[in-house]
Image: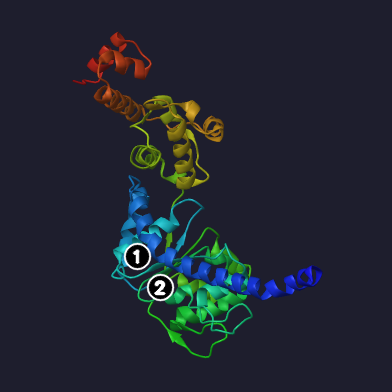
Amino acid sequence: MAELNSALLPEQIKPFLFDLNQSVVERALEFHSRHAQHGAKRDTLEDRPLLESKSSAMRRLLETARQAAQSEATVLLTGESGTGKNVLARQMHYWSSRSQHPFVVVNCTTLSVYSLETELFGHVGGAFTSGTKDMPGLLEAADGGTVFLDEIGDLSPDLQTKFLRFVEEQSFGRIGGAETIRLNTRIIAASNHDLAAAVAGHHFRNDLFYRINVIGLRIPPLRERFEDILPLAELIALQMEVIRNHRAELCFSPEAAAILRRYHWPGNVRELRNAIERAVVLAGRDMIMPKHLPDKVLRGSSDFAMPSAPKNMEEMKRQLIIRVLAKSPTLQDAAQALGIDVSTLWRKRKRYRIE
C-alpha cells in the first residue's frame, strides 16, 4: 500500500502545483500593477531634486518639459542610460492635469515578448492554459493617468504594431477577447537607443516613431552638465544618502571634490548616485576623502583634465571651512577635521573673511 501511495503521489500533486503556479503568476501581475501606480509618487518626491540644474541647456529642457506636461501630446524622452528619463517622466505626470490619476511604468526590457504583451493588454479567462480568469493589463491601470514605456525601442515588431493601434485609437483588446476597450491615457516613452537610426535600419516602425515623437526631449549626459556635478553630489550626499544610511552630516574634501569634477561619468546621474552612496557608507566621521570613492572614479579622473575654475575652487574651500567650523565645538576640533593646524586655520579664516 505504501508503494501504491508513493506511485500515486506525483499525479495527485500535479494539479495542485499547476493551480499554485497560476495563482502566483496572477498575484505577481496584480502586485506589479499596484506597485507601478503607488510607488511612482514616492519615487518622484525622493528624486525630484535631481532635476534641479545650473546648466542652461538642462533648464531649457525642463522649461519645455513643463510646457509639454500641460498638453495631451505624446512625449519621447531620449538620452544615455542613467540620465534620469524616468525621473523626468514622473515629474511631467505630476506637472500635468492628470497628476491625481495613476502613473504606470512599463519596462519593455524586463519581460519576454509574450509576458510583456499580457502585462500591457491583459487577457480574458481561458485565453491560455494558466489564465482562468480575466486579468486587466497595465494600460487599463493607467486609465485617466499616464503610462510610461521605458526603453520602448526594445518592443518586438509584433508588439510595435499592436501598440501603434493603441496610440492612434486609444483602444485595444485583451488577449483572447473580442471586446474593444477604450481608454483616456497620456503616453510618455523613453529610449537610450537612437530610434531614428533604428527606423532607418528597419528595426523600429516608422509610423510608431512619429506617433510617439510628437514632442522629443533629449536629456543631456552629465558630462555636458559640468556645472551640475558638485551640486548634485552634495545634494545626494547631504540630503539623500546621509539620511538613508543613518550618517551624521558629511562634506567633501577639496581633493575628493576635484576628482568628482574631473571624472566623465559614463553612467551619468545613476553612476554618480552609486558612487556617493558608497562614499557616504565608507567615510569617516565628517568628511568624504578620495579613498572613499570607487576605484573606477579615481582612475578615470586622472584621464581627464579638470577645467580651470580657480574662483569656484576657492569658494568651495571657503564653504568647506564654514561647514566644518559650524559643527566643531572648538577651533582645535575644526583644524583636526580639516587636516591642518590651528594657526593655519586662523589664517584661512582671515583670508576668506570668515567670522
Instruction: Name above or below for residue 48 compared with residue 328.
Output: below
Q: Residue at x 43, y 77 (%)?
A: 140
The numbered dot on residue 315 is: none
Q: Residue at x 51, y 74 (%)?
A: 120
Instruction: Name above or below for residue 198 compared with residue 323.
Output: below
**Camera sees residue 156:** no
- Residue bearing mark 2: 142
Residue 241 position within the rendered picture, expressed as x and y whole percent measured from the top left:
39, 40
Quadrant position of the N terminus in the picture? bottom right
Disc 2 or 1, which lies upstream in sequence?
A: 1
Q: How is the image coloured?
A: rainbow
Residue 157 position within the rendered picture, expressed as x and y whole percent measured from the top left:
61, 74
Nearest to the observer: residue 208 or residue 136: 136
Instruction: Name above or below for residue 312 compared with residue 169.
Output: above
Residue 168 position within the rendered picture, expressed as x and y whole percent measured from the top left:
46, 81
In this view, which residue lies farthest toward the left? 355
Nearest to the observer: residue 28 or residue 339: 28
The numbered dot on residue 93 is: 1
In this view, which residue lies farthest toward the right? 3
Q: Amino acid at mark 2?
A: Ala
SS at mark 1 in the image: helix
Mark 2 closeness class: few <14, some 14–19, many ≥20 residues within 10 Å: many
Determine which quarter of the picture holds residue 63. Answer: bottom left
Marks 2, 1: nearer the viewer: 2
Whole-number angstrom distance, CA of label 2 to CA of label 1:
12 Å
